[in-house]
Image (cartoon, grey):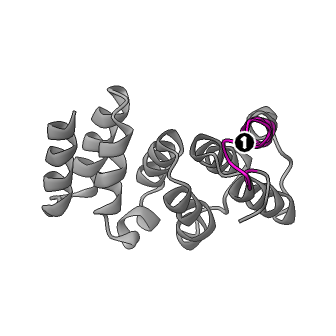
Amino acid sequence: EAEGEGGAAAAAARPVASASHMAAALRACSRDRRWGEAVALARALPPSAVEADPFLARLVLTAAAAAGDVTLASEIVTRRLPARGARAAGAADYAELLQAARKAGAAGAARRAWSALLAAGLRPDEQCYAHIVGALLEASARAASGEEEEALEAA
């Protein structure tokens, strides 16, 4: 697996011929659930490429959520989606951000995403509720077990 990750890092370092090639590579990584490699590829993209292509933005957000990469997911939801002008981030996008926070074990990030969702005037869907509750319950369980003293504190 380390060899595969190195291959993704090397591929990410090379310029990609087009957004469609990058989308195909991201789909392949997603199909095989190789989230770390998908995120490495996504990070190699210039922000303007993601801002210009809603489909590519969605692929990157899905990969970031599945990998638990809160930073990349947050960047997509708060900066790149609104920058493309087609539409602001919706509840489904925030659900992906909440999923990333849950996978990362970041209760503070989940709380911030929830607050941003509500501040945007959006109505949380079932996925949003599932991820925020999951993130807070998992943080509470870690705190109760002593695994993480500040699991419930907002970072």
| Closer to the camera in the image, 38 or 46 | 38
Task: Name the spot of residue 6 as percent of width and height, x first.
Answer: 16, 47
Position of 98 relative to 52 (above/below): above
Q: Amino acid at mark 1?
A: Gly
Going 22% across and 33% down the picture, which residue do you hit?
1
Q: Which residue is mark 1?
A: 146
Q: What is the span of residues highlighted in magenta in the rendered image? A: 131-151
Position of 78 relative to 6 (above/below): below
Task: Name the spot of residue 75 as percent of width and height, x first.
Answer: 54, 66
Q: Is residue 148 on the magenta stretch?
A: yes
Going 54% across and 44% down the picture, which residue do you hit?
65
Question: Is residue 149 shown left or right of residue 10?
Answer: right
Going 48% across and 48% down the picture, which residue do you hit?
64
User: Magenta segment, principal secondary structure?
Assistant: helix
Question: Is residue 44 shown left or right of residue 110?
Answer: left
Going 79% across and 56% down the picture, which residue do you hit?
111
Residue 109 sits in which quadrant? bottom right
Task: Name the spot of residue 26 as percent of width and height, x first.
Answer: 32, 42
